[in-house]
Amino acid sequence: MAETILTIGAIALELGIPVGLLIFMALRPQVRPRAIVILGALFPALCLYGAIAVSYLISRGKSDIFAFYAMWVMTFAPYLAVALGGLALSFLRRPANYWARFGLGVLTTPAAYLAFVLVAKVIPWRAG
């Protein structure tokens, strides 16, 4: 599989999850309490993506081109781990307030990333 296809797939998934959640929340209000936790968990990563994208656009692709194209592939696995962590905590019934649930999602991010790092250490990775 070509590197470009992997990058496009990572971009589509990493931007598609929040967009899909927002659309799903608009169409089905009863899923908002769960979706808002997942969006909260993805919020720090989306802020990082936004900062790198703005930096890339300001530099007109001269100095930040590597960071812009590499960020999608290099953060793919942690992004999914954080999304799954947000999904796991979205099943909690408390807190009921949307802002508190969003904050719960944001607080999920470091714990989910730590869990990803600990699990990734025990996986027997093989090259090629």
Image (spheres, grey):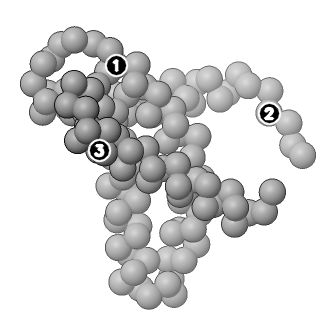
* Residue 79, above or below 35: below
| First in sequence: mark 1 vs mark 3 | 3
Left or right position of 110 against 77: left
Label disc, if present, on residue 51 of the rendered structure: none
Secondary structure beneath dot 2 equals loop
**Could you tell me if residue 11 is visible in this image?**
yes
**Observer-nearest of 76 and 90:** 90
Name the amino acid type tagged 1: Leu
- The amino acid sitting under disc 3 is Leu
Which residue in the protein does label 3 denote? 22
Residue at the spot x=65%, y=29% of the render?
A: 120
Q: Residues within 10 Å of mark 1 (few under 14, many from 20)?
A: some
Which numbered mark, 1 or 2, is in the foreground of this view? 1
What residue does disc 2 label? Answer: 125
Q: In the image, which disc is placed on residue 89? A: 1
Q: Earlier in the sequence, mark 1 or mark 2?
A: 1
Badge 1 marks a residue whose secondary structure is helix
Task: Give the quadrant of the N terminus.
Answer: bottom right
Which label's residue is closer to the chain start, 3 or 2?
A: 3
Residue 34: quarter of image: top left
In the image, residue 114 sits, relative to residue 46, either above or below, namely above
